[in-house]
Image (spheres, rainbow, N blue to C red):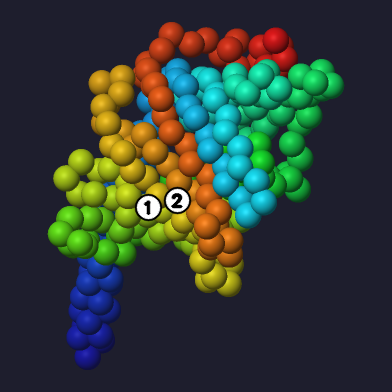
Amino acid sequence: MRGVYTNILLLSFLLLSWGSGLAATDDQRAREIVDQVDRLLRGKSSLGTVTMQIATANWQRTLSMQIWSLGTENALIRVTKPEKEAGTATLKVGNNIWHYLPKVNRTIKIPTSMMMASWMGSHFTNDDLVKQSRLIHDYFITISFEGSRNGVAVYEFTLTPKPDAAVVWGKVVLEVRQADLMPTWERYEDEHGVWVRELIFADYKTMGGRLIPTRLEMRPADKPGEQTVIVYDDLTFDAPLGEDTFSLRNLER
């Protein structure tokens, strides 16, 4: 009888292990795709120009900016137009962010308490600048849907925070086209499961030899009609950039 129980326990262990192996395989596949999407607009390094259009209930604003990035840790964004805003810049090194305000010749380091504050008056946040390098580290990632929607084969990934992750979202859901792994939308929920905002990807074009979504639209759920649109006017990958590009000295030039 003891041998029977031992065999049953062994069989149960093997079944559980086999099932866990499947889940791990699915998760690994999901993580690889999400990581690829995450790096889509950066590469090893990138240099480009973008136009950001902000529309709120009370005003509208358009900014032209230059952007530099090196890996997932370093980014520099400098406003070039309009003239009254020119020189305003943001530097990201790891999880640290600094803003430079040329009118008062002052550099401000953004504290942790301000990470969810608006970036440049837009519907993007300071946290958006740093979270891209943390997705595969701070979230469990699973494939929550695989099939056809509106005649297009897609994957849907659900990202839920790891217990010790210092993140603000209770869930992130990402849809990606199967054919070319282009993202179509990304939705964010708070810790109570309430939908907070949606990021729409569109206008897929080849820039720098790579197919990318050149239009990103961030739409807050609680403010219908408001949105921030970022359009990539030009983007070059694997640009020869050094780490000195991403320094406080260069930020303030």
Where residue 191 appears, x then y in whole percent? 58, 67
Q: Is residue 62 left or right of residue 98?
A: left
Q: Which residue is mark 2?
A: 199
Q: Find residue 223 and name its label.
A: none
Q: Is residue 146 left or right of residue 144?
A: left
Residue shown at 15%/59% (left/top)?
A: 151
Q: Quadrant of residue 192?
A: bottom right
Reply above or below: 143 against 75: below
Determine whether the residue tagged by mark 2 lies in a helix, strand or loop: strand
Disc 1 residue crowd, few under 14, some 14–19, many 20+, Cα 10 Å = some
Going by the picture, which residue comes out furthest to the right? 104
Q: Which residue is mark 1?
A: 185
Image quadrant occupied by the N terminus: bottom left
Reply above or below: 130 against 89: below
Amino acid type shown at disc 2? Leu
Determine whether the residue tagged by mark 1 lies in a helix, strand or loop: strand
Image quadrant occupied by the C terminus: top right
Residue shown at 25%/85% (left/top)?
A: 5
Where residue 112 appears, x then y in whole percent? 73, 44
Residue shown at 31%/64% (left/top)?
A: 144
Q: Nearer the viewer, residue 84 or 87?
A: 84
Looking at the image, how many numbered discs can be counted on the residues? Answer: 2
Disc 2 from disc 1: Cα separation:
5 Å
Q: Is residue 57 left or right of residue 153?
A: right
Disc 2 residue crowd, few under 14, some 14–19, many 20+, Cα 10 Å = many
Whether pointer 2 and pointer 1 mark residues with C-beta atoms closer than 8 Å, the reply is yes
User: In this orientation, does residue 185 appear?
Assistant: yes
Where residue 12 appears, x then y in whole percent? 25, 77
User: In this orientation, does residue 140 appear?
Assistant: no
Q: Earlier in the sequence, mark 2 or mark 1?
A: 1
Reply above or below: 175 against 100: below
Amino acid type shown at disc 1? Trp
